[in-house]
Each structure stands twice: as C-alpha cells, then as structure tokens.
Amino acid sequence: MSVYVIVEVEVTDEKAYVDYRAGTAATIVQYGGEFVVRAGKVEPVEGDWNPKRIVVLKFKDFEAAHRWHDSPEYAPLLAIRKKAAKSKMIMVEGVS
C-alpha cells in the first residue's frame, strides 16, 4: 500500500533552503519516491490551519519512505532543512 510523506514547512532561511531544495529531488527518486505536491498555493478552507508550504511525497510503502528519510544521501540535506525551516512531517498509508 502506498505511503505518503506529508510535510508542513515554514522556511526561515530562504538562502539555505535553496540548497535543500536543489538536492532533495534526486534522493527522493533514488529511493522510489515521487512528488505529489511541491509547495503550490495553499488555501485554508476549514479550521485554523494555515500552513505556509506543504509538500507531499509518495512511496510504495513505509519501508521505502523510511529508507529515504534515514538514508546517508538525505542526511546532510535534512540537516540543512532543520536549520533553514520549521517543519512537521508525518507518514500515512494511502488507499492505493
């Protein structure tokens, strides 16, 4: 069953975040993932949730998603993201 990685991001250092974005896509593809949503327009409809940036990734399963997130290729990029942004991330099973 597909697993979606959903990330809410508030970029605090645009310059550093450019380096993160530049390297991340290759690591996602390397581990079998793909972008579903990559920071398009966000429009709140219900509740008080108003995220600045949303990213959704799709992997074949939890194991693939964890292999990407915990990989040596992603580790230095993750360190950049943690310095350049405030983030919340979840992994959730999808219906396909």
Image: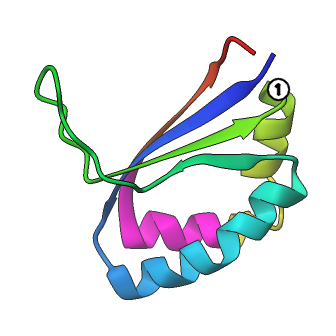
Q: Is residue 27 left or right of residue 57?
A: right
Q: Residue at position x 82%, y 26% from top?
A: 61
Q: Is residue 82 left or right of residue 32?
A: left
Query: Which residue occupies the extreme bottom position in the image?
Result: 15
Residue 23 on image: x %, y %? 68, 76
Q: Which residue is mark 1?
A: 61
Q: Is residue 44 left or right of residue 7?
A: left
Q: Residues within 10 Å of mark 1 (few under 14, many from 20)?
A: some
Compared with residue 8, is residue 61 higher up or lower down, i.e. above or below? Answer: above
Under circle 1, the secondary element is loop
Q: Amino acid at mark 1?
A: Asp
Q: Residue at position x 64%, y 71% from top?
A: 77
Residue 32 on image: x %, y %? 87, 47
Q: Is residue 37 left or right of residue 10?
A: right
In this picture, which residue range is highlighted in magenta?
Answer: 77-87
Q: Nearer the viewer, residue 36 or 80?
A: 36
Residue 46 on image: x %, y %? 15, 20
